[in-house]
Image (cartoon, helix red, strand yellow):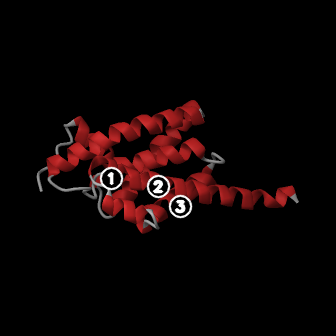
């Protein structure tokens, strides 16, 4: 494994501004960095459209960022690469049913569960798809699963209001 260079902007982003270097559980720390950044950006924009655009741009850039960093390290999908977690959080914020502390906590928990457990087809795709795209896609799918669960929770919490 080759050394990390946080002065390299590609590595700096791939390692989630350094959050991916925190032990244990770098993916969790990367997700926390993504949550902090997403909350700050939401407070500035309060725009799902902004987060959709941010997710698309960050995903496309992430395919290159993660691939290049993996090549530089000589390791495919090194656990310290957490840009994919950050982009996954951005995607959830684009579709989050409610922006408040409860749903921020639920976002973090549901995303981490799906990112760690990788239920079908996430785990299958994670094993089959290589390169930067492979690194990014499993977290996007984990985000989609999290969004679905968050909407079930949202409607469950508000069901009493409808009755």
**Tag shown at residue 141:** 2
Mark 3 — residue? 110
The picture places residue 147, in percent across and down from the top left corner, at 58, 53
Give the mark nearest the N terminus, 1 or 2.
Answer: 1
- Report if residue 43 is visible in the image: yes
Please tell me whether mark 1 or mark 3 is closer to you in this view: 1
Q: Which residue is drawn at 38% across and 60% down?
A: 125
Q: Relative to residue 106, is residue 41 depicted above or below?
A: above
Q: Distance between the residues labelled 3 and 2?
A: 12 Å
Q: Do the residues labelled 1 and 2 touch (CB within 8 Å)?
A: no
Mark 1 — residue? 134
On screen, residue 52 versus residue 150, left or right, reads left
**Tag shown at residue 99:** none
Residue closest to the eye, 86 or 37 = 86
Q: Residue at x 22, y 56 (%)?
A: 76
Residue closest to the eye, 124 or 144 = 124
- Report if residue 82 is visible in the image: no
Q: Relative to residue 17, is residue 47 depicted above or below?
A: above
- The kind of secondary structure element at disc 2 is helix
Give the mark nearest the N terminus, 1 or 3.
Answer: 3
Other-residue count near label 2 (Cα within 10 Å), few / some / many at <14 / 14–19 / ≥20: many
The picture places residue 69, in percent across and down from the top left corner, at 21, 46
Q: How many marks?
A: 3
Q: Residue at x 53, y 61 (%)?
A: 110
Q: Which residue lies furthest to the front in this view?
A: 128
């Amino acid at each position: 494994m080759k050394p990390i260079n946080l002065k390299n902007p590609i590595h700096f982003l791939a390692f989630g501004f350094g959050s991916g270097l925190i032990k244990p559980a770098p993916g969790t720390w990367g997700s926390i960095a993504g949550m902090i950044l997403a909350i700050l950006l939401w407070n500035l924009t309060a725009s799902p459209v902004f987060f959709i655009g941010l997710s698309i741009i960050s995903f496309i850039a992430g395919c290159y960022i993660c691939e290049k960093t993996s090549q530089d390290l000589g390791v495919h999908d090194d656990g310290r690469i957490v840009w994919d977690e950050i982009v996954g959080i951005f995607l959830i914020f684009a579709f989050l049913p409610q922006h408040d502390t409860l749903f921020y906590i639920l976002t973090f928990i549901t995303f981490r569960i799906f990112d760690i457990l990788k239920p079908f087809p996430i785990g299958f795709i994670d094993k089959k798809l290589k390169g930067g795209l492979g690194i990014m896609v499993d977290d996007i799918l984990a985000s989609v699963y999290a969004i679905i669960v968050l909407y079930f929770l949202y409607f469950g919490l508000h069901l009493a209001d409808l009755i």
